[in-house]
Structure formats: structure tokens, C-alpha cells
Image (cartoon, rainbow, N blue to C red):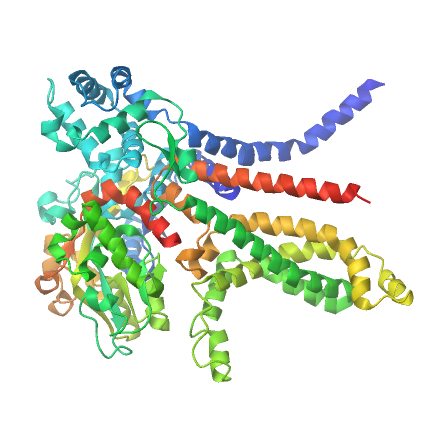
């Protein structure tokens, strides 16, 4: 009795196995790795073990002791892997600018001479206590919250208490908020354009429907970069739109459409529109066509019929379309970079800087983690709201 | 974020894939646009013919993390890359480049001293400075003060998006002498002063990232002047008959170098390619297409006089120009970039 059921389960498991494997390798694993990189910080503790032991008794305010300096030099002599040393330098320099040039110089001196070294004589920066504080903080723990704190513009001050970063030093919170506002605006614009479009496409037949759907699908098959570049050409001051407006006398000077928020919203709405139209269309196509005439025969005004009949039935499509558009819009990078101005950059451009520019994977991971968490909270609120609506009469 | 992650892993897998597969073709990476077109003509295609093997060329927009991630992933999918001075310094310290075989190149003495390093060979000396369209602008800008003066020359200005260069230029616009820029910038007050000066121009700035963008911005009239790389300006003047000007006083020059990524499967061929591109005879052809200075001393002497005057290395053009302070930027890049990004977002 049980055997056939079991084999059925095995078969169905085998059928989903490729998808499962794909999700694990391309989704779960990278996600976990990036999350881990946000909080793990083992490089200094691993490369500077003797320093870590000797700084544990240091109070971080008095001048560095001779033992600490000797332990530090001894540790530097032990590091044989250049790439590991590079990781250490990057970690220290991201806490305190200056280690980039200081560390190779110190390491070279440590390797060239056998005995003890007067670090302050080698470079006066070693006399500055803040460099030693950075070494001490980095070496004493293998996990850190500094990336996560920095991702929301916070830091630990010298006493270890959490404090905000000076307003002109970091703007991650503002950029994060902007990312959500822009994604919401694009979603709203997509609903306003996409719903009527899907209604028309669902109400006609034959070649007209093919044409309308083709108009949505064709751009989807074109590269994102090409579509963005096309918008660049259309929107610029001497582009098609402004030339037409100026030649027809609507305006005398070009309307600023590029390097500002308006341009980014226009281009992103166009790029993401298919993800709104298609789900709404697929829902509307399933609604019996005689519902609207039925409402009209009962005396409902077309607007009322739309509001009371078509809109509630099509809402499922709107919701899934909105989710698709919103989630995709959150991660946009190329379009704001090319069409937007400095105040229209989204959080992905900051993440990209840390990953590809600074090779600071910890910060990139932390910002990603904060974005993911914020998105999850929004998603949870949405689930809560939508389930309430379904149960309420 | 998810997409980024997936791409990273996909890249990693792709590189693992290439490692196990047959050795891929030599891949050379440079900075795109009309510069790479020139390189393709005088280095890439002749070298491929000479070696009898195909050569793939790709372009990039810089970023140390890109190179570091490729080497960390195992076997990199790029071989020879042209990098900026800080990427050379950072990567050499981190050990992500192969050591240069200077014997293959005829010895270090054949090159400008600043173009010689353990990990890289100088490819070009290039300059960043003010450029403008001589056909559209009757009154040419002469200094950074003019660049900042929107009353004298109304219109938008293009700047490379990043703290590097923008801060130096702002200080010069604020009256700091060119040779004192880095000593002022090394103090917190100097940094504040630079950002304050940038504030003045902020509403009129269009930021660009790739080296081909400022040419496009100038051509379309989107900006009246912009910072740009000098070679591309003269290259465009020659190929499209434009009359773009470039202001050498107050410009900042730097050296780009060829490096070979660590554990590249084609490292010997890549080194051969670099040797080929560094030969005096081959290198001396470059200024005909694009006006960059040449690190090979003999190559510099072979360049015809009519092209000499356009190079950043000509004595006239060096007057009032300064060299990029690589040490300053390797130390301060991350902190200043973070502040710059925050400033941009405000």
C-alpha cells in the first residue's frame, strides 16, 4: 500500500531536484555567503595572533606598549601569503585611512631586519594611538557588527557605544529610503499605465491583441542596456522629445528630462511595464466577458461597473504585478546610473562600489542584508494585509 | 542583490569551468572607446597575426574589486589588463599580479622610471583636464576657476564621478596652487574646503563614469565643458573633424600599466603581448591615433614632431600640470569615496 506512494514521492522529488539544486547553488549558497561576509571578520585575528594576545590587556587609551609593538612585528614576519596580507591591509585601512601605505612599509622593514624595530621611528603614524586602536579592535574578535552598523550610518565610538556617523560622512540610510520611494513610484506608474493597457488588450481579439501584446513583449526581448541607452537619446536636452517640443513652440528652452528623477522614473517604468501588464492581462482574460454588460443591464454606470466588478476581480493580477515590479525595481543599477543624476542613485550603486571598487565584501554584504531585511518586512506587511482582506467580509 | 550574488557565483563557476576546459584564448582588457580601437589596430591584431593565435579583447571601467574577485575565484578569465596607478599599487601589494619579466622587455632602463614596477609595465601617460568644444564656445576656459565660473561661461559641466580628481580640481578652482594640492588635501580642513567648493558647482555638474561618456556629452551639447582624458579628445578631433580643446595647465597626469593577473593560464603569452605592446617601434604608432605619452623612452623619440605637441609628456604641456599622488589615494580612497557618496546623495 505504501510502496507505490513512496515511489511516487521519490519520482516527484527527482523531478523537482534540478530546480532545488539550482536554487541551492545559485540562490541559497550565495545569499548565505554574503550574509556571512557581513559579520565575519577573521582576517586580523588569524594573521595577528600574538598581537591579539598582547592587546587584550591594553586599555586602548595609553600609548602602545613595547610588547605590543614587538608582537605586531613578530606577527608581520609570520605572514607569508601576500593575498592574506592584502586582506589584512584592506580590513585595517577601511577602519582607519593610512594603513594602505603604512603596512607594506612596516612589513618590508620587519622582513629586512632581524631584531626589534622602533615603529615610531620607522613611521610617525605608529605614534598615533588611533592606528593601534584600529589594530586592537580588528585583532580581538572574529565577528563584527561594524559593517551592519555602517550600513545604517552607525558606528562604535572609542568607548564601544553605538553612535551615529557624522551626517556628511555617510548617507546609506537616505539612499536606502530613496530606493524604496523610487521603487514605489515606479510600481504606481506601472499600475496606472499597465491596468488600462491590459484591459484594452483583454477586450480586443485577433491581430489587435497580438499587436498590443507584441508592443509589450518586444521590448522585453531587447537588452536592458539598449533600452536604457535609447531613453538616453530620447530624453537628452537636444533629444527627440525636446526637439519636437521646442520646434512646435510648446517650450522655448529644453525641459530637463535627463540626469534627474523624472527621467529615471520614465525609463524604469518603461523597462518594467511588461512585468505589470502580463500578470494583469492573464487575470483579466479569465474574467467572463458578460460581467460588464450584466452590470450595465442592472443600471450601473460604466465607472461604477469598473470599480465594483472589474477592478476587484483584476486586483490579484495588480498585486502580483506590483510585487514583481517593486522587487525588481529595488535592485536597479544601470538605469539610474545612466539616466539619473547624483541624487537618483539607488542602493545597488553603493553595493556595487563596495564590491567592485573597494573590494570591501563585508560592507557590500551588510548593505545587501539590510536591503533584504527591509524588503522582507515590507513583504510580511503585505502578506498580513492581503490575508486580512481575504478573511474580512 | 540576489542578482548580484547569482552573477558572482556564476562567474566563479564559469572560471572554474574554463580552468578545467582547454586553455582559452588570450584575453586582453583595456578601457574601451576610441583608445581601445587604436590599441586593437596597432597591438591586438598584429600580435594575434604574429602569434598565430586569436586574441580576445574586452573593456572595463576600473575597480580594484573586479580584479581581486577574479583572482580570488581561482583561475581568472582575463589575462593582461590595463590598470590605473592605484590598482597597480594595491594589487602589487596584495599579490594578485604576476611578476613582470623585465628581461623580456629589454630591461628597466628602457622605460620612464615612473613606468617601472615589479608587477606592471607602463602603457601610457595620460592626462585628465578641462576639455571644451571649440566650435561652440567662443571664449575658451583657461583654468579651473573658469570651469567653476558659471556666470562667465553658462552651462553644465561634466566631471568624472568619484572623489579622485574632483577634489583636486575643486582645490585648484579655490586658488590652491597646483603643486600644493596634495599637501592641502592631506589635512581635514583641506578636504572640507574641497567639498565646500564642489558645493558651489553641484547644481551644474553632470557626472560621468566611462571615458567615452564625456566625448558624447560634449558632442551632444549636454555640457559646455567637461573633464576628459586628453588622448580621446585629440583622437576624436582627428577622426571626426571636431575642434575640441584640452587645457593642460591644471591637468593631472598619471600612468596606466599593463599587468598579468595571478595564475592566468596564458601568463607567458600575456607577457609576450605586453613585450610586443612595449616595443619602441610598436608603441610609437599610438600617438597618431590617440595622444597619450609613451613610457618607452625610445618610442617617445620616434613619434613624429606634429604629434609630439599633443602629448601630456611634451615639455610645454607639463607646465602647470601635476602628477597624480598614488599614495594619497591608496590610503584615502575608501574614506573619501564614502564621504563623496554621502555628499552626492545630499
Which corner quadrant of the image does residue B335 belong to?
top left
Q: Residue at x 91, y 67 (%)?
A: A297
Spot occupied by residue B71 in the image (x, y as percentages of width and height): 35, 36
Is B248 left, or right, of B203 in this rendering?
A: left
- Toward the right, the furthest residue is A298
Which corner quadrant of the image does residue A82 belong to?
top left
Q: Mark yes or no: residue B62 visible.
A: no
Q: Is residue A38 above or below residue B198?
A: above
Is B167 left, or right, of A342 in this rendering?
A: left
Q: Residue at x 79, y 43 (%)?
A: A392
Which corner quadrant of the image does residue B284 belong to?
bottom left
Is B174 left, or right, of B26 in this rendering?
A: left
Q: Nearer the viewer, residue B48 or A375?
A: A375
Q: Count every numbered label the image shows and give the total.
A: 0
Q: Which quarter of the image is occupied by the N terminus of chain A? A: top right
Spot occupied by residue A170 in the image (x, y as percentages of width and height): 37, 44
Q: Which quarter of the image is occupied by the C terminus of chain A? A: top right
Spot occupied by residue B89 in the image (x, y as percentages of width and height): 22, 41
Spot occupied by residue A146 in the image (x, y as percentages of width and height): 38, 32
Q: Nearer the viewer, residue A14 or A216?
A: A216
Q: Mark yes or no: residue A118 visible.
A: yes
Q: Nearer the viewer, residue B102 or B216?
A: B216
Q: Residue at x 64, y 63 (%)?
A: A193
Q: Is residue B106 above or below residue B137?
A: above
Q: Nearer the viewer, residue A165 or A297?
A: A165
Amino acid at each position: 500500500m505504501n510502496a507505490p506512494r513512496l515511489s511516487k514521492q521519490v519520482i516527484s522529488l527527482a523531478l523537482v531536484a534540478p530546480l532545488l539544486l539550482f536554487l541551492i547553488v545559485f540562490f541559497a549558497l550565495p545569499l548565505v555567503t554574503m550574509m556571512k561576509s557581513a559579520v565575519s571578520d577573521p582576517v586580523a585575528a588569524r594573521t595577528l595572533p600574538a598581537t591579539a594576545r598582547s592587546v587584550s590587556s591594553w586599555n586602548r587609551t595609553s600609548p602602545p606598549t613595547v610588547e605590543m609593538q614587538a608582537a605586531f612585528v613578530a606577527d608581520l614576519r609570520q605572514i607569508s601569503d601576500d593575498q592574506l596580507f592584502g586582506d589584512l591591509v584592506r580590513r585595517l585601512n577601511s577602519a582607519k585611512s593610512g594603513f594602505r601605505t603604512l603596512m607594506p612599509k612596516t612589513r618590508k622593514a620587519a622582513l629586512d631586519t632581524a631584531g626589534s624595530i622602533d615603529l615610531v621611528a620607522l613611521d610617525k603614524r605608529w605614534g598615533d594611538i588611533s592606528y593601534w586602536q584600529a589594530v586592537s579592535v580588528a585583532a580581538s574578535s572574529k565577528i563584527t557588527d561594524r559593517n551592519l552598523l555602517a550600513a545604517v550610518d552607525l558606528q562604535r565610538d572609542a568607548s564601544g557605544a553605538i553612535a551615529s556617523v557624522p551626517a556628511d560622512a555617510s548617507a546609506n540610510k537616505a539612499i536606502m529610503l530613496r530606493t524604496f520611494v523610487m521603487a514605489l513610484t515606479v510600481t504606481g506608474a506601472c499600475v496606472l499605465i499597465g491596468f488600462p493597457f491590459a484591459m484594452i488588450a483583454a477586450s480586443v481579439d485577433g491581430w489587435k491583441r497580438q499587436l498590443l501584446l507584441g508592443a509589450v513583449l518586444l521590448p522585453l526581448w531587447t537588452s536592458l542596456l539598449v533600452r536604457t541607452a535609447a531613453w538616453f537619446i530620447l530624453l537628452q536636452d537636444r533629444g527627440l522629445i525636446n526637439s519636437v517640443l521646442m520646434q512646435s513652440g510648446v517650450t522655448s528652452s529644453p525641459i530637463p528630462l535627463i540626469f534627474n528623477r523624472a527621467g529615471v522614473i520614465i525609463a524604469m517604468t518603461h523597462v518594467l511595464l511588461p512585468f505589470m501588464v502580463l500578470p494583469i492581462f492573464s487575470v483579466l482574460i479569465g474574467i467572463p466577458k458578460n460581467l460588464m454588460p450584466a452590470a450595465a443591464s442592472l443600471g450601473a454606470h460604466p465607472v461604477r461597473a469598473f470599480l465594483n466588478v472589474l477592478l476587484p476581480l483584476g486586483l490579484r493580477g495588480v498585486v502580483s504585478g506590483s510585487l514583481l515590479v517593486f522587487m525588481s525595481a529595488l535592485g536597479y543599477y544601470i538605469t539610474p546610473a545612466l539616466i539619473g543624476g547624483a541624487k537618483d542613485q539607488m542602493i545597488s550603486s553603493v553595493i556595487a562600489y563596495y564590491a567592485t571598487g573597494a573590494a570591501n565584501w563585508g560592507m557590500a554584504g551588510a548593505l545587501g542584508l539590510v536591503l533584504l531585511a527591509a524588503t522582507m518586512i515590507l513583504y510580511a506587511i503585505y502578506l498580513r494585509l492581503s490575508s486580512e482582506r481575504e478573511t474580512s467580509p | 542583490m540576489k542578482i548580484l550574488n547569482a552573477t558572482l557565483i556564476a562567474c566563479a563557476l564559469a572560471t572554474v569551468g574554463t580552468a578545467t576546459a582547454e586553455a582559452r584564448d588570450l584575453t586582453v582588457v583595456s578601457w574601451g572607446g576610441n583608445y581601445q580601437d587604436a590599441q586593437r589596430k596597432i597591438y591586438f591584431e598584429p600580435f594575434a597575426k604574429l602569434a598565430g593565435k586569436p586574441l580576445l579583447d574586452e573593456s572595463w571601467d576600473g575597480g580594484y574589486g573586479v580584479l581581486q574577485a577574479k583572482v580570488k575565484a581561482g583561475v581568472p578569465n582575463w589575462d593582461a589588463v590595463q590598470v590605473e596607478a592605484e590598482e597597480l599599487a594595491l594589487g602589487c601589494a596584495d599579490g594578485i599580479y604576476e611578476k613582470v619579466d623585465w628581461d623580456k622587455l629589454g630591461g628597466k632602463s628602457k622605460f620612464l622610471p615612473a613606468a617601472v614596477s615589479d608587477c606592471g609595465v607602463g602603457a601610457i601617460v595620460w592626462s585628465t583636464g578641462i576639455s571644451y568644444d571649440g566650435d561652440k564656445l567662443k571664449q575658451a576656459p583657461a583654468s579651473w576657476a573658469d570651469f567653476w565660473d558659471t556666470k562667465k561661461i553658462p552651462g553644465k559641466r561634466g566631471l568624472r564621478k568619484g572623489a579622485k580628481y574632483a577634489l583636486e580640481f575643486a582645490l585648484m578652482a579655490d586658488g590652491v596652487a597646483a603643486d600644493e594640492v596634495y599637501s592641502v588635501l592631506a589635512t581635514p580642513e583641506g578636504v572640507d574646503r574641497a567639498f565646500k567648493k564642489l558645493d558651489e558647482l553641484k547644481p551644474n555638474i553632470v557626472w560621468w563614469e566611462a571615458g567615452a561618456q564625456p566625448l558624447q556629452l560634449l558632442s551632444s551639447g549636454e555640457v559646455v565643458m567637461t573633464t576628459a582624458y586628453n588622448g580621446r579628445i585629440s583622437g576624436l578631433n582627428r577622426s571626426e573633424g571636431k575642434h575640441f580643446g584640452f587645457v593642460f595647465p591644471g591637468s593631472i597626469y598619471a600612468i596606466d600599466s599593463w599587468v598579468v593577473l595571478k595564475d592566468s593560464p596564458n601568463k607567458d603569452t600575456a607577457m609576450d603581448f605586453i613585450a610586443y605592446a612595449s616595443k619602441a617601434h610598436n608603441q610609437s604608432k599610438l600617438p597618431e591615433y590617440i595622444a597619450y605619452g609613451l613610457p618607452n623612452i625610445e618610442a617617445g623619440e620616434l613619434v613624429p614632431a606634429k604629434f609630439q605637441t599633443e602629448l601630456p609628456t611634451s615639455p610645454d604641456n607639463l607646465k602647470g600640470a601635476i602628477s597624480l599622488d598614488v599614495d594619497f589615494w591608496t590610503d584615502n580612497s575608501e574614506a573619501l569615496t564614502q564621504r563623496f557618496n554621502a555628499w552626492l546623495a545630499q
